[in-house]
Image (cartoon, rainbow, N blue to C red):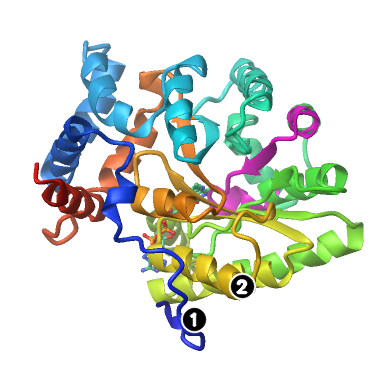
Amino acid sequence: MHKTSGLLEPTPTIQFNDTETAFSGKTNRELRWEYWLFRLMNNPALTNIFSWLAQFSIRLRLPVKWLIKRTVYKQFCGGETLEETVAVLHKLEQFHVGAIIDYGVEGKETEKDFEKTKNELIRIIRFAADKKNIPFISCKITGLTSFALLEKLNLDVLLREDEAAEKEKLYRRMREIVNAASEAGIGLFIDAEESWIQDAIDEVTFVMMREFNKTKAVVYSTPQLYRHDRFAFCKKSLGDAMEHNYVLGLKPVRGAYMEKERKRAAVNKYASPIQPDKDSTDRDYDTTLLFCLDHIDKISFCAATHNEQSSLFLADEMHKRQIPHHHPHVSFSQLYGMSDQVTYNLAKAGYNVAKYLPYGPVKDVIPYLIRRAQENTSVSGQMSRELNLIYKEMKRRGI
Ligand SMILES: Cc1cc2nc3c(=O)[nH]c(=O)nc-3n(C[C@H](O)[C@H](O)[C@H](O)COP(=O)(O)OP(=O)(O)OC[C@H]3O[C@@H](n4cnc5c(N)ncnc54)[C@H](O)[C@@H]3O)c2cc1C
């Protein structure tokens, strides 16, 4: 049990150590293959070499695409095109697992690219509209405007004429996307990014929520609980929803840019926005989940985490409060290719759960794949969490 849940007795709703359920979608051959892949990723030296090779080979146009596509890409991505994700979607559906489609292309900076991303997001929404298991799609604001503009907006200073026009274009693009999502009945997760552009992201998110979340949550904002000010931000967000009479959409995460945040704060000599330690992040994460449950009529939320304690804490808490497992305002999510023990066991127990499923050309999703490989590498020579579970299931099957 988590520290924050210490006052309550655990309810045995689900067991995340049930590897039989976790890997029920995998044949012996697939499991063995996954074991070798995670074993390779478990080695920090190999992961570093892979990260370096992947970046440079793609830049130098060396013929390594086939190798990446058959290994890490296959593990963590749905396909190169939207249509290629269909096979994965069907497989997830068999186990009552949904998908959150993510156009995984990163690091684009031209007007042409921003328009392309907007059009692709609208295409995903229309594609998702007639599929049973795509409740949400996700979107990065940095895919729709320049990083420089977001940095300027964050400073809240007077904009030049060209910057004001660029801001206008961002809001127009967002309105088109959210309008399509609203018509299709699909939720739109707006990813959280670096703190020095996050106020600008929050501002556009609030504007869209006030307009489109009147009767149900279409737009979801992402609080990163590794920031010490984000629980207060969640309370402020609920205040805004009450004042403007809309349903607040939240996708609480712990946060993905910790090293970068701390380094920038140290170099520029300002107080780090990050919590002092992991326990503080965990405490605020679980407190936020409780806060969402306390206001379940006004908040629709998705616990986007691989953390077993937090997932179990939320599942147990819902169970104790007699909130139906499939309540439309509560869902869980993990990244595709990771933490199947959480996803498949929650799905079996009837909770709303979806895999975050990126797709895109191999060369454009390399940064995403490198982050996944690095996350799954061993720290202090220990087996990674995934490798341990796969090994356990192989032993159970006797293979
Ligand atoms: C579906 C989904 C969507 C996501 N969307 C976003 C997004 O929009 N924006 C984003 O930034 N991230 C996003 N993430 C990533 C997320 O923020 C985490 O990096 C990742 O999920 C690991 O955290 P965890 O809760 O799964 O579990 P854990 O493995 O328990 O937690 C690891 C996290 O704890 C925090 N942490 C670790 N050490 C410390 C420390 N010493 N002090 C303080 N905090 C610490 C860090 O945030 C670290 O990533 C998403 C993740 C998922 C599953």
Asked whether residue 183 is drawn in magenta, I would say: yes
Q: Which residue is mark 2?
A: 290
Numbered label attached to residue 260: none
What is the x, y in percent for residue 206?
A: 78, 50
Q: Which residue is mark 1?
A: 4
Q: Residue furthest right?
A: 244
Separation of disc 2 and disc 1 at Cα?
10 Å
Name the residue at 39% across, 71% down.
278
Image vertical order of residue 60 relative to residue 358, above or below: above
Observer-nearest of 209 and 10: 10
Marks 2,1: beta carbons within 8 A: yes
Where's the C terminus, which quadrant? top left
Residue 298 placement: quadrant: bottom right
Dot 1 amino acid type: Thr
Q: From the viewer's perspective, is 297 left or right of 318? A: right
Name the residue at 74% across, 51% down.
156
Image vertical order of residue 356 relative to residue 196, above or below: above
Q: Earlier in the sequence, mark 2 or mark 1?
A: 1
